[in-house]
Image (cartoon, rainbow, N blue to C red):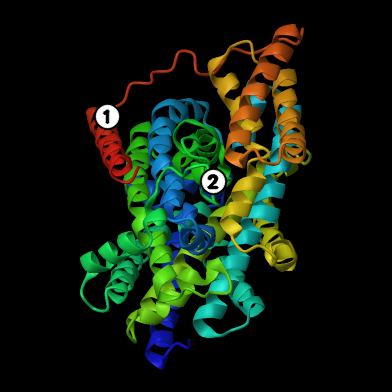
């Protein structure tokens, strides 16, 4: 499929406009020398609507749009549990985690670990997160983005990846988090409108022009197994989504780690004007997450009928863009690229933040703020170059990149969640217990994967979490190392009526969804 001249013009206008807006935002409120707070935390000035939009733009990228649509093609609606359960997780993060983090006035998650434990825990986790963001997250976004551009335009995947990297650098490297967060509003509008339009056209095509309701009815009639939210043990995809575990098992651990302690996600909330603004932004993001399966999963299911013989599941979403009429095709392509580059910008900004504030600054202290901002820009650019070099060798052989990402990160998420939860809510937790949890998570995950291969990875995550929690409690209790008070003490966790009402409504929607598609 090739884009027409009008589509290319629309897409080019989007690229130029986004770079121009980001440049304007970067300069508008700039007075005096740059500071790390300005570059890495947008001078703590983000309003709730920018936080909510930026959370979703950072999250919804190639691995969601391309990867989750591919999983929808293979697995069906059950993969939407990642999105819908994330909505509840976001509300828990807003109520119980953000008050702690904002009170401590931190830049990064490793900085919190330094305050709560010691420099060893901070350094180990800082190095770990930088490595994961470069070798897993950035590579996945670039690779799937290059694949999408190749499918839509015919441009080879390497050129597509280079374009995405350069585009990301052009609008985010100078302005930092402020440029990323405010342009994310444009990105999310494009993503939602373009995604809903493609879902509409896909369902209409499934019904041969008889409308979306008829198209949806045909999908449910011809592909009933694709609408099982809770998979049975006989389902060939049970290993990826093991039945009731998506509601009560390891998926909670993965979501809490991702939405609560993941730097490139939580950094938006850390940059809020105040706690109330951060919580309102979190609530907005939760409702947008409820909408995401309509945008990213449903088209993947429709592609089973429209394109039943795809060579790779991850080509499902790009192949559907051909349904768009000339002109709108350029818009939906812009929406797809918007999602990709916004995540690239968010990840590189967080990599630069952690590298600068948690790895470089402790070694080279007493430097100027301008120096640290410069180092951050170099770190961001270097991370993109490295990710470009290793993306294809790492991910080129995988059919469902989204599932690869989940399983790989599942090796470490149990330990991460143990470290933070015990640190926040148990006063006796100490650095030795935290390091035991971190090391135990990786070792236990690898051992269980080798010795118990029939155990679904989501169940493995839950089991490893329980073992690491017990190990952390045991080591902390036996250790003579002095522990600090848990930083959750003396914190007011009460929330506004509007936040409570939003949370109640979100729960009602989820109960209705799972009751319908159980």
Relative horizontal placement of residue 311, taking residue 363 as reference (left or right)? left
Query: Which element type, helix, strand or loop, lies under badge 2?
Result: loop
- Residue 71 horizontal side relative to residue 284, left or right: right
Tell me if residue 159 comes above or below residue 254 in the rendering.
below
Q: Say above or below: 492 vs 500.
A: above
Could you say which is closer to the camera, residue 244 or residue 183?
244
Distance Cα–Cα, label 2 vs label 1: 35 Å
> SS class of the residue under badge 1?
helix
Q: Position of residue 266 (x, y in %)?
A: 50, 41
Specify the quadrant of the image occupied by residue 134.
Answer: bottom right
Q: Residue furthest bottom?
A: 5
Q: Which residue is mark 1?
A: 500
Is residue 175 in view from this perspective?
no
Please state which of the two labelled residues, at mark 2 or mark 1, is closer to the viewer. 2
Residue 390 x %, y %: 74, 64
Q: Which mark is residue 238?
A: 2
Where is residue 441? Give x, y as percent. Answer: 70, 32
For image coordinates 55% across by 38% down, the residue present is 254
| Mark before the other along the chain sequence, 2 or 1 | 2
Vertical order, 364 against 7 (above or below): above
Tag 2–tag 1 contact (CB < 8 Å) = no
Mark carried by residue 456: none
Q: Is residue 434 visible?
A: yes
Q: Residue at x 52, y 45 (%)?
A: 241
């Amino acid at each position: 499929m090739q884009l027409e001249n009008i589509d290319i013009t629309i897409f080019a206008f989007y690229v130029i406009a986004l770079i121009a807006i980001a440049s304007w935002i970067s300069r508008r409120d700039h007075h005096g020398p740059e500071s790390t707070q300005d570059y890495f935390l947008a001078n703590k000035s983000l309003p709730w609507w920018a936080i909510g939009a930026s959370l979703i733009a950072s999250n919804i990228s190639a691995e969601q749009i391309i990867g989750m649509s591919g999983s929808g093609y293979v697995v069906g609606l059950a993969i939407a549990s990642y999105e819908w359960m994330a909505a509840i997780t976001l509300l828990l993060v807003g109520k119980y985690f953000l008050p702690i983090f904002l009170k401590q006035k931190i830049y990064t998650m490793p900085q919190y670990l330094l305050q709560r434990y010691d420099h060893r825990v901070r350094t180990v986790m800082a190095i770990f997160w930088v490595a994961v963001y470069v070798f897993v997250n950035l590579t996945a976004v670039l690779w799937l983005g290059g694949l999408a551009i190749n499918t839509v335009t015919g441009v080879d995947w390497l050129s597509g990846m280079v374009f995405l990297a350069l585009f990301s650098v052009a609008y985010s490297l100078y302005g930092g988090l402020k440029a990323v967060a405010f342009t994310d509003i444009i990105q999310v509008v494009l993503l939602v409108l373009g995604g809903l339009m493609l879902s509409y056209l896909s369902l209409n095509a499934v019904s041969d022009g008889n409308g979306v309701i008829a198209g949806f009815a045909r999908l449910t009639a011809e592909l009933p197994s694709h609408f099982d939210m809770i998979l049975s043990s006989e389902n060939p995809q049970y290993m990826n989504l093991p039945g009731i575990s998506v509601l009560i098992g390891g998926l909670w651990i993965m979501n809490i780690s991702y939405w609560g302690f993941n730097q490139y996600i939580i950094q938006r909330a850390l940059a809020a004007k105040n706690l109330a603004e951060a919580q309102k932004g979190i609530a907005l993001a939760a409702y947008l997450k409820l909408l995401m399966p309509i945008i990213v999963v449903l088209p993947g299911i429709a592609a089973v009928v429209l394109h039943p013989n795809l060579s790779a599941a991850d080509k499902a979403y790009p192949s559907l863009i051909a349904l768009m009429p000339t002109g709108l095709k350029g818009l939906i392509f812009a929406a797809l690229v918007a999602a990709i580059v916004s995540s690239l910008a968010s990840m590189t900004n967080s990599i630069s933040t952690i590298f600068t504030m948690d790895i470089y600054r402790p070694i080279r202290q007493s430097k100027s703020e301008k120096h640290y901002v410069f180092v951050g820009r170099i770190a961001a650019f270097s991370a993109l170059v490295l990710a470009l070099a290793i993306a294809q060798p790492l991910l080129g052989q995988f059919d469902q990149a989204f599932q690869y990402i989940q399983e790989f990160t599942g090796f470490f998420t149990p330990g991460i969640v143990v470290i933070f939860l015990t640190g926040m809510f148990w006063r006796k937790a100490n650095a030795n217990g935290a390091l035991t949890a971190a090391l135990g998570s990786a070792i236990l995950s690898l051992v269980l994967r080798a010795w118990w291969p029939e155990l679904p990875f989501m169940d493995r995550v839950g089991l490893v979490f329980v073992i690491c929690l017990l190990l952390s409690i045991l080591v902390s209790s036996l250790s003579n190392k002095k522990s600090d008070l848990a930083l959750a003490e003396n914190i007011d966790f009460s929330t506004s009526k509007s936040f409570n009402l939003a949370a109640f409504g979100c729960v009602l929607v989820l109960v209705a969804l799972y009751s319908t598609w159980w």
